[in-house]
Image (spheres, helix red, strand yellow):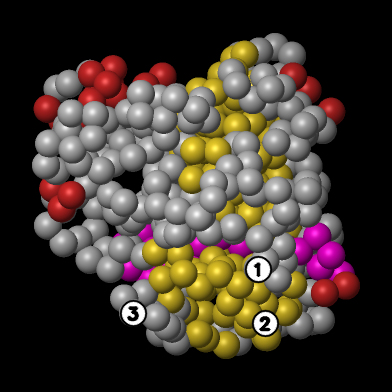
Amino acid sequence: MSRNPATWPVGAVMASALVAGLPAVALADTHAPGLSHTTVLSGLSDPWDMAFLPDGTMFFTEKCDGLSVLLPDGEVNALLGIGGSEGYASTAEDLFCEGQAGMMGVAVDPDFEENRFLYVYSTSSMAEPGTNRLMRFTVSDDLAGVADRTDLIEDVPYKPEASDQPFGGPGAHNGGRVRFGPDGYLYLTTGDIHGAEVPQSPTLLGGKVIRIDRDGNPAEGNNVPEGFDPRIYTYGHRNVQGIAFHPDTGQPIAAEHGPWHSDEITALVPGGNGGWDPRPNMAGRGDCPDGYCGYEPEQMEGMDPAERAAYMPMTDFETYPDAMPPAWDNNGLSQGMTAAVFLTGDHWGELNGRMAVGFMGIGFGDTPVGQRIDLVDIAEDGLSVHDVMEMPLPMGPGRFRALVQGPDGNLYTAVDEGNIYRVAPE
């Protein structure tokens, strides 16, 4: 379905439960439901995240365009564009996109009906050489615009240039997921920007999970070591692009990109260290390109994942014996683990309570490997997994960037290729 609402039939989007005639795709587990899909939006530019109101209204971001809202009747209002974008009710000239950076996570305030607050994470040129910012806006009553921008966090690091690194590029590793937890606090995930000192730094906000209240103040009980920025909840991360909350315990669980190996799912504890430290001359490492050892040794040199993990561990227990242990490491592979959400509701059958995790895949040319959604059965203590199964995709593979459970109980996913889908159990 085109992004242009003028071309849509009235009520074509989100008004029906399933597209008639689409075959159900069954999971291997006979007690799990079949799945069907609806294309909610297509023709988007790198859709990055979504957030819902109870009536199905869906806010969504496009990395290099801006923030929009899809109304239940199928109309789209373009609310806030980044600098240079056209067709939006307003633009913010300091916001820009470059590489992996741009307009990323979005979250709706739990008290939206009273305060109209919406939160957006985006890259800004307001401070040199640029930063990532968490902003709060007030949405108009008619859902046609946003106002009252308040920058709650202004100083998440941004990578301005590739420097001498033979990898990455400007705008790399920003994290970017914004979610409210069941504790009422706002969680923001950030990335290490290919900065060797960043993940373990007590003051730099890259490579962290941040927990604040809706005014930007540190949450009570963050429990970070003395001398740390009190907004930090956990540190020592590489690039967390997924965070979800266990439906029984409320514990936050992160999904994180690995370095040529070991994407990780980790249950977070206040003040915890993720154990990622890509500095040179640690654990026997020598010099590394631009001082960042995060891709040493090269994956394509033929070294198997276990050897790479021993040289450059994702969670370095030797250096940080009290680091938070991952519950799952994607079988030692790095395939671009991104968004995460728990599927809840009896309509999911045997999948009720599993965490869905998206993968963008890794590879070269037109043959990426690993593009999928996994369904992870995580132990209640968050320290292990009972089982992992791959979701058969009724809409086919893609670079899965966002996963959100909508108010209708179904799974919504955004793919970099420009679509937002709705996946429903039968």
Which one is closest to the eye, mark 2 or mark 3?
3
Name the residue tied to disc 3. 128
Q: Name the N-terminal-most of marks 3 and 1.
A: 3
Numbered badge on residue 52: none
- Highlighted range, magenta: 96-113
Q: Position of residue 60 (x, y in %)?
A: 60, 63
Identify the residue under disc 2: 146
Q: Amino acid at mark 1?
A: Gly
Q: Quadrant of residue 359?
A: top left
Q: Three-letter amino acid code at disc 3?
A: Glu
Which disc, if any, is residue 216? 1
Q: Are marks 1 and 2 in contact (CB under 8 Å)?
A: no
Looking at this view, is 97 or 14 the one in front?
97
Q: Is residue 105 magenta?
A: yes
Q: Classify mark 2: helix, strand or loop.
A: strand
Q: Is residue 250 magenta?
A: no
Binning the other alpha carbons within 10 Å of mark 2 as few (below 14), some (14 to 19) or many (20 upward) gives many
Q: Is residue 48 visible?
A: no
Q: Quadrant of residue 121?
A: bottom right
In the rendered view, does 192 fall on the left or right side of 72? left
Amino acid tagged 2: Val
Q: Position of residue 214 (x, y in %)?
A: 72, 66
The quadrant of the image that shows the N terminus is: bottom right
Residue for point 12% across, 36% down:
286
Q: Characterize the local packing of mark 1: few (<14), some (14-19) or many (20 or more) Cα atoms within 10 angstroms.
A: some
181 up-or-down from 203: above or below = above
Could you say whether the residue bearing mark 1 is in a helix, strand or loop?
A: loop
On screen, residue 210 versus residue 334, left or right, reads: right
